[in-house]
Image (tube, grey):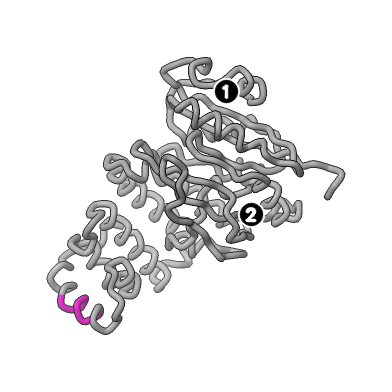
Amino acid sequence: MRDYLPLISVILPVWNPRADWLAAAIDSAFHESHCQIELILVDDGSDKSPDAWMSAEDTRRVRLIQHPHTGVGHARNVALSECRGDFVRFLDGDDLFLPESTSMLLEFTRGELNTVAYGATILSDPSLKPQGIARSRMGGCIHFQTALGRFSSTIPALLIPRQAAVQVGFDERLVVQGDWDFVLRLSEIMDFQGTTQPVYIYRRHGNSHSTNIAARREAVRSTVLIVRGYLERHPELRGTRAERRIRAYAQFLISKLRNQHSPINNRRFWMAVSADPVRGLVIAGTRTAAAGLRSARKLVSRFLTAETCF
């Protein structure tokens, strides 16, 4: 394939990990034959020492960094400052890379350092039974679509040139939604090239942020910060339909976070419908555009009584 085997830095932050899931995650990172792997494991202030949740064999094949508990964003930034690879992938301690997935993503970059490669993510239950798949079909400059939440690939499904990852870094203010913010800012400086082939397994379980009520509340605050930041970086969007669509998506997202089962009962949802009716119909599950728009016209006047919060 090639004489030179690129070095890929895999960054794995953990905090009080489950030992068997972590062992599987570590093992999955090394199932590659066309690249070298440097695995950097950052212990983000776990209650027990690494000996309690990592085998002696795994200890020998990872670079272990330990520091007080400060959150996943800081842990990833610490690893980025230490990594030596040509490219970077991120891994979580309860999830898995698919075999040879890093090598496959490397082919999409063609060895060039101006492209981020990505693949699809299998969504599974705790026993790794597939429940769905997250995939995208975008390429080139995708930051506007990312701001609208339409790029659905996960961070561990990306292969990123190291210098770009270091330049962007993670916003440590964001307890959740940090992945969206990172990919959004990354897409502003890099082209993306992807495949619909799965490269990663995301394990959904009770402790994950996606099922945590407190995390959803924090996500509301993060959404405001991320959208404001993006619009500040792109003053050319001020007053345009693009700006209204981005603000509308943020309102849709907040209404869904606050009313997970019935977002249409939230005033923010109808504030967003006024800016982007089609997106509102999708979230509301309305299939007939005409009927949905008639409902929107009736309800918007009732729910819309203030400016948006952005």
Which range of residues does the magenta coloring cover?
A: 293-298
Q: Which residue carries the number 1 mark?
A: 65
Quadrant of the image for the C terminus? bottom left
Q: Residues within 10 Å of mark 1 (few under 14, many from 20)?
A: some
- Residue 74: x and y in percent read 49, 32
- Tell me: residue 104, above or below residue 169: below
Q: What residue occupies the far right of the structure in this picture?
A: 3
Q: Amino acid at mark 1?
A: Ile
Q: Which residue position holds label 2? A: 117
Q: Residue furthest bottom?
A: 290
Tell me: 249 left or right of 8. left
Q: Residue at x 57, y 23 (%)?
A: 65
Residue 210 among magenta residues: no
**Kind of residue sitting beneath label 2:** Ala
Relative side of 106 to 271, left or right: right
Q: Which residue sits at x=53%, y=47%?
A: 155
The residue at the point 67 percent across, 39 percent down is: 31
